[in-house]
Amino acid sequence: MNRVIVYGSNGALGRSITVFGIDISRNEKVDHNILVDPSMNMQGQGNSIISQIESTVTSEQGKLQVDSIICVSGGWAGGDISSKGLKFFLASSIHP
């Protein structure tokens, strides 16, 4: 059985293929919701996500077992590393 973690699971991709979903709101169509507290900083969110994933998808051998992690959270922004919108793009795509 393949297992996929979709960060931003409440969008089109997450609704169609996910088993485990990470988002700031529940997605009733996934098997496991990993909820992100938007008031936490990135480090706190990361620690919380890892803890929730480990308690949900760790195998009998004690190893984290997933086939893929897909991030579809956030939006799209054009430009390069020097663009003024880079900070916003990173915040919306990596740190929702």
Image (cartoon, rainbow, N blue to C red):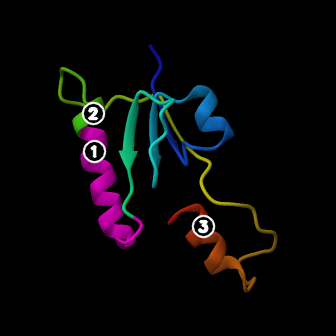
Q: Is 89 left or right of 65, judged from the image as shown? A: right
SS for callout 1: helix
In this picture, residue 7 sits left or right of residue 48 = right
Q: Residue at x 18, y 20 (%)?
A: 60
Q: Which residue corresponds to the image point at 42% horizontal and 66% vertical from the top-left?
A: 38
Residue designated by label 3? 92
What's under tag 1, amino acid-wise? Gln
Q: Pointer 1: what residue?
A: 52
Q: Distance from label 3 to label 2 (Cα)?
A: 26 Å
Q: Where is residue 64 in the image (x, y as percent from the top left)?
A: 29, 33
Q: Which residue is drawn at 57% across and 43% down?
A: 10
Q: Which quadrant is the N terminus positioned in? A: top left
Q: Mark 2 points at which residue?
A: 56
In the foreground, 19 or 3: 19
Which of the two discs, 3 and 2, labels the residue nearer the N terminus? 2
Q: Position of residue 6 (x, y in %)?
A: 52, 40
| Magenta-span inclusion, residue 50 | yes
Q: Residue 61 carries which label?
A: none
